[in-house]
Amino acid sequence: MTLPATAILILLVATTVILGEVQDRNSTERRLPRFQDYAVSESEVFRGPAAALKLPASAASDVRAKLTENATGQPNFAGHYEFVTWGCGTNCTAGAIVDFKTGIVYSPPLNERTRWLPEYRGWGICAASWDGPWEARIDSRLIVISCGWNYDAQGKNWPDVYYLVWRENQFNELLHIRPPKK
């Protein structure tokens, strides 16, 4: 090999290594939120009797009934909350967040998508194809929800995926993944 060919080979290898590192760094930066990144402490996990439910006066009687019927009384989210869901018609899911320490009931994430349902205004989660699932954990403030109408030519729905974190009694969107156009 001549000197110029060796130099070109070294330059090519160095460029490949550098580009590989940049690609690895970018993929690390795009890492999906993980439950352990939003962990709650062991002391935040609920272990006592639940406080009485405190629903806002604006909650329709149907919401009250569905919440009473579907709540398990066991926290499943962020230490002392239960993420409760129930069906609200074809392609619709409603729900609430119940705080067992205080009894306060909060609107669910993504509730703006069901504002057109008068009886569930502020209580619906996804007024679209609820292909689910949602995932929450008692030891994390992160919740992951899949919903939306995104059908491909074969009729398969590819729902949007939302990564939300519970902070100061409300959900903040961390990441919204839209499926590619099919």
Image (cartoon, rainbow, N blue to C red):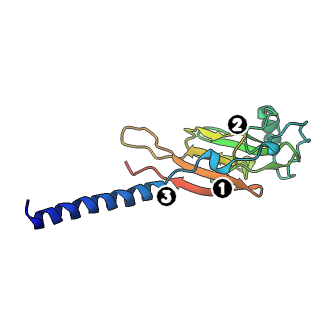
- x, y (%) of residue 99? 82, 45
Picture residue at 91% right of the left edge, 41% below the top: 51
Sequence-wise first label, 1 or 3: 3
121 lies above or below 53: below
Asked whether 11 or 44 is in front, the reply is: 11
User: Can residue 180 be seen at all in this image of the molecule?
Assistant: yes
Picture residue at 89% right of the left edge, 38% below the top: 50
Asked whether 165 or 158 is in front, the reply is: 165
Question: Which image quadrant is residue 21 in?
Answer: bottom left
Q: Which residue is mark 3?
A: 29
Spatial CA span between label 1 and label 2: 17 Å
- x, y (%) of residue 103? 88, 45
Sequence-wise first label, 3 or 2: 3
Question: What is the number of callouts on the image?
Answer: 3
Sequence-wise first label, 1 or 2: 2
Q: Which residue is mark 2?
A: 86
